Amino acid sequence: MKYLILALLTVAAVGTGGQAAPRYQFRDTTLTCEERVNDLLRRLTVDEKIGLLRATSPAIPRLGIAGYNHGNEALHGVVRPGKFTVFPQAIGLAATWNPSLIHRVATAISDEARGRWNELGHGALPSASHSGLLTFWSPTINMARDPRWGRTPETYGEDPFLTGEIAVAFVRGLQGDHPRYIKCVSTPKHFAVNNEEHNRGWNIVTVPERDLRNYYFPAFEKCIREGNAQSIMSAYNGVNGYPCSINKWLLTDVLRGDWNFDGYVVSDCGAPEYVVSLHHYTGSYPEAASLCLKAGLDLECGDNVYIGPLKEAYDRGMVTMAEIDSAAYRVLRGRLRLGLFDNPDDNPYNSIPSSVVGCADHQQLAAEAARQSLVLLKNSDAMLPLDLDAITSIGVVGINAAKYEFGDYSGVPLNTPMSVLDGLRELAGDRVEVNYAPWNSATSSYTLLGPTAMPDGVKVEYFSNSDLSGTPVTVQDSYIYYDPKNQPPNPNVPASPMSIRWTAEVVAPSTGRAQFAVTSDDGCRLYFDGRLMVDHWEIRPEATNYATVKIEKGKRYKIVLEYFDNGGEAVAKLAWRTPVVEGARPIDKYGDAAHVLETSDVAVAVMGIDRTIEREGQDRESLDLPADQTEFIREALKINPNLVVVLVAGSPLSINEIDESAPAVLYAWYPGEQGGRAVAEALFGDYNPGGRLPLTFYRGMADLPAFDDYDITHGRTYQYFTGKPLYPFGYGLSYTTFSYSDMRAEVAGDSVAVAVTVTNTGNRDGDEVVQLYVSTPSGSPLAPVRQLKGFSRVGIPAGESRDVVMTVGIDDLKLWDEDSGGFVLPEGDYLFQAGASSADLRLQKIVRLPALSGVENIGVVPGIDVSPVENGVEIVADTACDVTVHDLAGITAGRGRFPTGRGHIALAPGFYLVTATTASGTSTAKVLVR
């Protein structure tokens, strides 16, 4: 109680959200943001300023400033504290090709963050665990240039244009649209070229500036210029000689100089310390602090460099107060924009109720995002959708059938998530029977005991204590298996501490020695025909114990497994390895799957990978599906050729054999808490898949350059890969078909407007993702084969047509020129192609564009200078001049007479011919106004 009273007194003194006495100008909302931040800065000591430069900033009680934690994650839902809505992983969001949907998802995420923040007293409670609710280190917008990268699932794919469009929508959704307040700070990461996990802490990559400007940078620039991202996270690795944490060219020259970024830069966690310990760029922590600060790194995630060492660097004259002030200014401005120094009632985001967390609308949105992310890769002979009127049973098998795979940086769902098995059962209802066999990996010779081994089923008794006492809840089951983490919640299971007893009769399939494997987290006892074979009745972490017994074919044996759970992690299961049966098939080692496949009209195999194969800190060693899964599909098709393969993964899989043999393949990514429902709806035809691949699916590792080769022109991505992929970038099928016609393209000001008519020629409503690719004129050095420059996901009813219009900014067609050190627009014929994927281009138009690199002087007269400026052109001449401006169609766009020789003509963005005439002659220039 003493601590609660102290906390409440602190809230009263500081004010909710950090409000204090009005005598401080930084509390005065009538002043500008700059005035308020400068007022606060001048009141701080050097130690207090340095304290602001760490992610977990301490409170400054004398000024009524609460502590603040800058760090949380929101790639596809808020991670902490507590439970939230879990949307599809980022790569799945990209597969929707729907920025407006992603904006809705990000808006829901930020609403839930503010709702929880408000529930916890608008940040007034002295707890660092929830302060991070307003500052998110999301999204991850590094280019997925190589599918081996372990963090590919966190990205929006391999293309800078698609990534930029999705990322801007996400950033805007997180930050909100209020003119004064930011709902949550978005932090696009990791700047720059962070693409390997195994060596990320010390790797310094060499990349041509051409590739940086054309490929690795554009999504970051778009997030800053169009999304107004308030923060950027730098990367662990280095670029072209310097660790990113101390790379002034990246953090100052490019971010702030070229792109006018006015937010703050935060390090990846521990990265400044790596400048010393892993990069070995310097052996001195004060020097590392100085290098980071001078480069433009404002905030350290961690406290190894910007606490003691930075103060020491200041005391030794290695950094100036002005440099510390600049960093502190940018960090404080971000907190002020969140409204942390204002009266909470002034901020509309503080009225978002906590009931928004996990609300019905957000569950529906999670389901819609999962639906739109699904990519249909194959559908031979219209295998899908399944006709429930023509079948009586569905078999469900596979490693991911009953699991919830959310991917990295995932929160815990407030509502009960739905696996694919859950979704199939719920939607099938009593129309068809859904049979299921838990996965048994062939990499292990042990299989779970199931209906084949225990034909009479299993008696299960649940006790609400840890000693099997009292009256239990008794049910029947088919397996001796308890795994609450990967199973749907069981209403019969009491809260911990609790205990379970399974009782069954096992029928021996063969004669010889059998070995039982009992796995449990906490206590277990195994009895075989009355004999105690395993006895570990104690609290313990997960472990497996074994018991060997003799069995005779056809004979029945009674088995009893007893288990208790004292809380925390929980698991209990019984598997066995039986004597080899003469004539056994390869699939028999996968437990009861063969029985389910044989007794079902159609089957659904839910396969894929998980965080044990791809995640932060671990790159993939192969593009293949694990060998046992490929073997399983091969053998399963021999038993039941009506097999649909659903793949759960966060990056491309080289499924060459499955593509050749399975009749239907659906890619589900990591689909979030409502993913099982979305998959079932697609399989049953309640939803027509319309997602498209945001990545190239290669046939194998042989298609890839060396992992550490960052030159994008060396055959990387659809832009430069000249081989035949398994599935191309932008690919995806539908249950209907679409035709393209009547493509139009014309230059309009500073852009090219392209229109195409798309017709749904099938008998089902469906979504088509119309994609527009542009190829630069032939002869352009190292130009991509083609680049995505526009797309539109459009729903079209069966038999109807839609006109789809896409606009390409001419400025977006420029390429970086190494010789001139700037962007240029090569003159010539640009090929605009529209179609259904990067390899399925149906229509094309040639558009001729003039060369441009800022200003092109056509006829120059000394003493006359024409310069494009924002929203117009500026004229500087030695004497009086007359100026006329035409657009490229020859229409007069402006004119003026300037007696002094100096003047400005306002113009809309676009290309213009500017003619300036003086007594000395006439000068003509072609300019681009932005």
Image: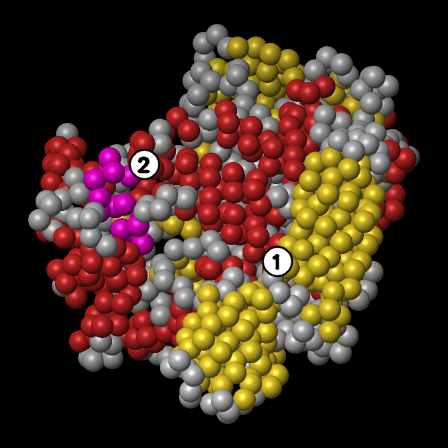
Image: 423 above or below 347? above
Q: What label does residue 346 carry, if any? A: none
Please name the residue that numbered disc 2 is placed on.
Answer: 348
Residue for point 32% across, 47% down: 180
Q: How far apart are labels 2 and 1 at the CA level?
A: 33 Å
Front residue of 322 and 666 = 322
Residue for point 66% across, 25% down: 423
For mark 1, give the secondary structure.
Answer: helix
Please name the residue that numbered disc 1 is placed on.
Answer: 161
Q: Quadrant of residue 229?
A: bottom left
Residue for point 12% across, 60% down: 43
Image: 749 above or below 279? above
The answer to whether residue 710 is visible is: no
Q: Is 928 on the left or on the right of 310, as rendered? A: right
Q: Is 766 on the left or on the right of 165, as rendered? A: right
Front residue of 757 and 306 = 757
Residue 261 rendering spot, x and y as whole percentages: 40, 64
For mark 2, give the secondary structure.
Answer: helix
Going by the numbered disc 2, the residue's amino acid type is: Pro
- Residue extending farthest to the top is 471
Q: What segment carries the magenta color? A: 334-347
